[in-house]
Image: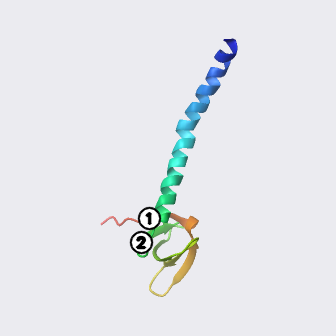
């Protein structure tokens, strides 16, 4: 009984850490992965560097993106920070 009363605070602390830190990170990683998998030609995205580009072609590990009408470059899918939504 004494051991249980000593371990209870540690178990409680671990449960709090799970619900406050670990679980939200897992949810965010899952939603980010789903967003990247759902990207298609014509979508606007913001890169990790803060540049807004248009998806030109989706490949297995890379995205070909257009900076303007003349410039198309390849970036890794990990470089996509978020999908860009116009505030219009």
Q: Position of residue 14 (x, y in %)?
A: 61, 32
Label 1: element kind? strand
Q: Quadrant of residue 5?
A: top right
Chosen colour scheme: rainbow
Q: Residue at x 50, y 71 (%)?
A: 51
Residue 35 visible to the viewer: yes
* Side of 67 where 8 appears, left or right: right
Q: Position of residue 35 (x, y in %)?
A: 46, 61
Q: Residue at x 57, y 77 (%)?
A: 74
Whether the residues at callouts 2 and 1 have beta carbons within 8 Å, the answer is yes
Q: Quadrant of the N terminus?
A: top right
> Which of the pair 70/22 is nearer the observer?
22
Q: Position of residue 28 (x, y in %)?
A: 50, 51
Q: For mark 2, what is the residue? A: 43
Q: Residue at x 66, y 17 (%)?
A: 4
Q: Which mark is residue 83?
A: 1
Please determine whether, in this image, residue 49 is positioned above or below residue 19.
below
Q: Position of residue 77 (x, y in %)?
A: 55, 68
């Amino acid at each position: 009984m004494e051991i249980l009363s000593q371990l209870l605070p540690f178990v409680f602390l671990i449960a709090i850490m799970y619900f406050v830190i670990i679980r939200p990170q897992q949810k965010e990683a899952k939603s980010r992965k789903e967003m990247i998998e759902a990207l298609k030609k014509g979508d606007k995205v913001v890169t990790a560097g803060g540049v807004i580009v248009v998806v030109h072609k989706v490949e297995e590990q890379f995205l070909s993106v257009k900076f303007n009408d003349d410039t198309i470059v390849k970036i890794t899918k990990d470089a996509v920070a978020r999908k860009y939504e116009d505030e219009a």
